[in-house]
Amino acid sequence: MSTPELHTSVPGTADLDNPLYYLENFETVVRWVRQHHSDLLTDKETGLINNLMALEQPARALLARMVMRTGELFRVEKLNYPELGAPVPEAAETLASMGWVDAAPDLSLADVFRLFTLSELRPALADRITAAGLPANAAKGLMKDILLPLHPDPAPVDQWLKGLPTRVMRLKHMPLFDRLRLMFFGNLRQSWSDFVLVELGHQQYEQVPLSTESRAFDERDDVDRYLVMHHCRERLDEGESPDSVWQDVPAASDNPWLESRRGRLLFELGKLAERAGDTTLALKAYESSGQREARLRQLRLLERQKRYQEAWNIATLAAAEPRFGAEERGLERILARLSKKLGEPRARPPERPAVTAFTLTLDNPGGLSVEWVAMEHLNEPEAPVAYVENTLINGLFGLLCWRALFAPVPGAFFHPFHTGPVDLYREDFVQRRQALFDECLGHLAAGTYKTEIRKTWKQKQGIASPFVFWPALPEDLLELALECIPARHLELMFRRLLANLREHRSGFPDLIRFQPGHTDPERRHEMIEVKGPGDRLQDHQTRWLEFCAGHGIPVSVCYVRWSGATG
């Protein structure tokens, strides 16, 4: 299927002082899809979009408002949008005449209970309440439980609630708006309201050149498959049985991105099946999933079923090539348990570097976080301490590697409002940009990294990034970090980040202590993980601590105890 040429012009975001800014942003999305994804739309869908854009402004604005709200049913008298430029009932009539809303939809009694208050329902349903043998002052929940089975057939609102001055309309064509949203965002996680009302007007975005390959989808069938999987997930969330949903999960495809989504769906289905006691389906779903945590769940379930040999065979093969760090540790524990059950020789766990630890006993009369109390205690004029957690090293990485992260790689950016590349966590992310990352990290060996990081910090200030959280990286902290953290340490941590961006971007120690005057350049900083009473290290934190300790990067764990009753 041919892909339309994309123009280089970037649509602007609406002025937030304009009361109809949401309409402008909404139409930016619709126009972008019509322009760049026209080959994925049917003639009927294209005609509906053209019809939408030809509506009068009040009708378009009201339609946008309804699309952004939850559900498809609306009480006309409850819609209050003075900025439309016309009364809501008038705009609603226009939408009804053009086929965008049903002005007199049939409602189920469940819809009626959802749309109307108890004080409205009691008088309007009085005859039904009496006929059901309920007291006149029955609670809404009780009324609903008793009346719904007695009145299963839908009817217009004026038949349910005779004498109540109300109008209800149903928004039509929501599947089209879901399809448009999916093709623009590449996901259905982002809602219209989140994006149009918040993100477009409140963030700055890196402007990445878009190519003819810069689209979320190239085939309509891929869009359809995504929508089917999304519907399957919704059915699971609504309580439908995993076995029923399993029948409709699409078969595997050769699209890696869709396969990753299918894997997540199967993983959730497997967990629900396991919870429901359907272990056969759960194991089948886990095995088919390929999701990061699915193999560990599969092995633990096999253990509980006493299928030790089967679990041992799978775990032994998996241990030779673990999918990620957390799986490696999990497999070690599972194999240790299984070796006892089967009488197999227990594999010797790899030696891990010791991590320095110390204990502080502190007061906390203000009830502050344990990290903050420890930071204030450790802070000294000649050795300032900052509470950075995952923001500092990620931020320095994001600044140095900005060009690589925002490279116009096909399929990484497909509209002008991305906060980062959409393929960030795919297995081939680094491989597709290897030369660029090598070039960026080359500044560490060349000694030019400080200049590059400072330049990016100034030039890109405030632009959304998946690694740089600007409020947590002020210039004084940036300068201290560049002065005290040697290039060797940065390169080691950055390369570990690149080995698994999803897993390794978290787990960094809470605090960093700078010692600019230290005679050893490799001891001018120390990262400190803080643990309060009853808290323990998580696996992903332990892996970072051991990595740093094993490579000579100063790191320690601070265990805090409260003095008296001040904790």
Image: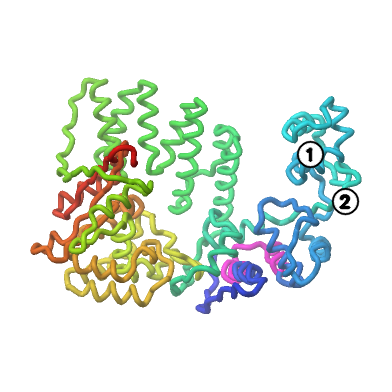
Q: Residue type at mark 2: give it.
A: Pro
Q: Look at the image and tell me in which quarter the N terminus lies.
A: bottom right
Residue 282 lies, in percent from the top left, at: 46, 31
Q: Is residue 264 visible?
A: yes
Determine the residue located farthest toward the bottom in the rendered image: 9
From the viewer's perspective, is residue 547 above or below residue 312?
below
Q: Which mark is residue 165?
A: 2
| Crowding near the residue tagged with mark 1, few <14, some 14–19, many ≥20 C-alpha atoms within 10 Å | many
Front residue of this view, candidates 415 and 538: 538
Res. 109 mark: 1
Mark 2 or 1, closer to the camera? 2
SS type, badge 1: helix
50 magenta-colored: yes
For residue 359, above or below residue 504: above
The type of residue carrying mark 1 is Leu
Foreground pick, 345 / 147: 147
**Residue pictured at 18% horizontal, 25% vertical:** 345
Q: Residue at the location (56% across, 55% down)?
A: 223
Which element type, helix, strand or loop, lies under badge 2?
A: loop
Task: Specify whether residue 512 is painted magenta.
Answer: no
Q: Is residue 222 visible?
A: no
Residue 288 placement (x, y as % from top left): 43, 39
Work out whether 321 lies above or below 5: above
Left or right, 314 with respect to 258, comes to: left
User: Residue 456's image quarter?
Assistant: bottom left
**Range of residues picked out in magenta:** 30-52
At a point 33% along the width and 50% down the height, the residue shown is: 503
Q: Main secondary structure of the magenta part?
A: helix
Q: Nearer the viewer, residue 525 or 240?
A: 525
Residue at the far left: name it.
519
Label total for image: 2
Horizontal side of 532 relative to 253 (left or right) equals: left
